Amino acid sequence: MGMTRTTPATQRAPNRHQADVALRSDPVVWLSSVQGDGRPHVVPVWFHWDGERIVAFSKPGARKVENLRGRPAVMLAVGTPGPDFEVELIEATAELPDTPAARVMPRGFGRKYRDLLARAGLTLQRFTEVYSQPIILKPTRFLGYGGAGWTAAAPAT
């Protein structure tokens, strides 16, 4: 069964605004990187969006950090996979600064993740100690996607 587009292409053109809305409200962005052997690696990360860059944090020895050291080009997915499947795709370039996480922690990060930090039994200070590697993601292209308007094509008769 194929997919048929039911809305004009111009209505669903890549739209930075839709990605911006999701980046400001969603708790995770899915970060896709490439391993040394070429296999993809996808993980959810907590993040902060300031309108120009995404700041995330990782354990220094994590697979994603090793991947980013070798290949800093990434794909991000953000949004809500609900009935309209409003997910936006973003190409970005990752930087791994040597600065401690506590120094680059954006204002509002602790507030955004207060409940999730509590559920994980972490203070913001402990989070910055464990997830001490900052990851700065600079979007290079907003691809859109947003599945609204896609329906399953009727089977051929």
Image (cartoon, rainbow, N blue to C red):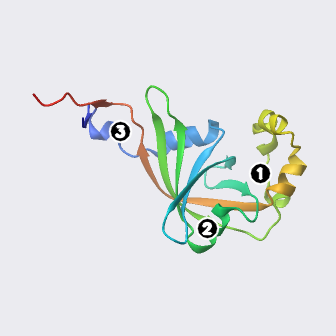
Mark 3 burial class by Cα count in 10 Å: few <14, some 14-19, many 20+: some
Q: Looking at the image, do the residues carrying marks 3 and 1 touch, with CB atoms under 8 Å apart?
A: no
Q: Residue at x 28, y 30 (%)?
A: 152
Q: Pick whichever of labels 3 and 1 is earlier in the sequence.
A: 3
- Asked if 57 appears above or below 80 in the picture, the reply is below
* Frontmost residue, 79 versus 50: 79
- Residue type for callout 1: Pro
Residue 92: image x %, image y %?
Answer: 53, 60
The residue identified by callout 2 is: 68
Give the left or right position of residue 139, taking residue 83 as reference.
right
Q: Position of residue 148 (x, y in %)?
A: 38, 31
Residue 12, disc: 3
**Which residue does the image show at 62% across and 37% down from the upper left?**
26
Question: Which residue is pictured at 60% across the width and 43% down the height?
Answer: 23
Give the label on residue 106, or none.
Answer: 1
At label 3, the amino acid type is: Arg
Alpha carbon of mark 3 to alpha carbon of mark 1: how far?
Answer: 32 Å
Q: Are marks 2 and 3 in contact (CB under 8 Å)?
A: no
Compared across the picture, whether 141 is left or right of 96 comes to left
Crowding at mark 2 (Cα within 10 Å: few <14, some 14-19, many 20+)? many
How many dots with numbers?
Answer: 3
Task: State whether residue 57 is above or below residue 21.
Answer: below
146 relative position to 19: left or right: left
Residue 100, given in percent of the width and then of the height, sits at 83, 64
Label 2: element kind: helix
Return the residue nearer the eye: 124 or 33: 33
The label nearer to you, 2 versus 1, is 2
The image quadrant that residue 24 belongs to is top right
Q: Nearer the viewer, mark 2 or mark 3?
A: 2
Report how far apart the C-alphas of labels 2 and 3 lie in the structure.
31 Å
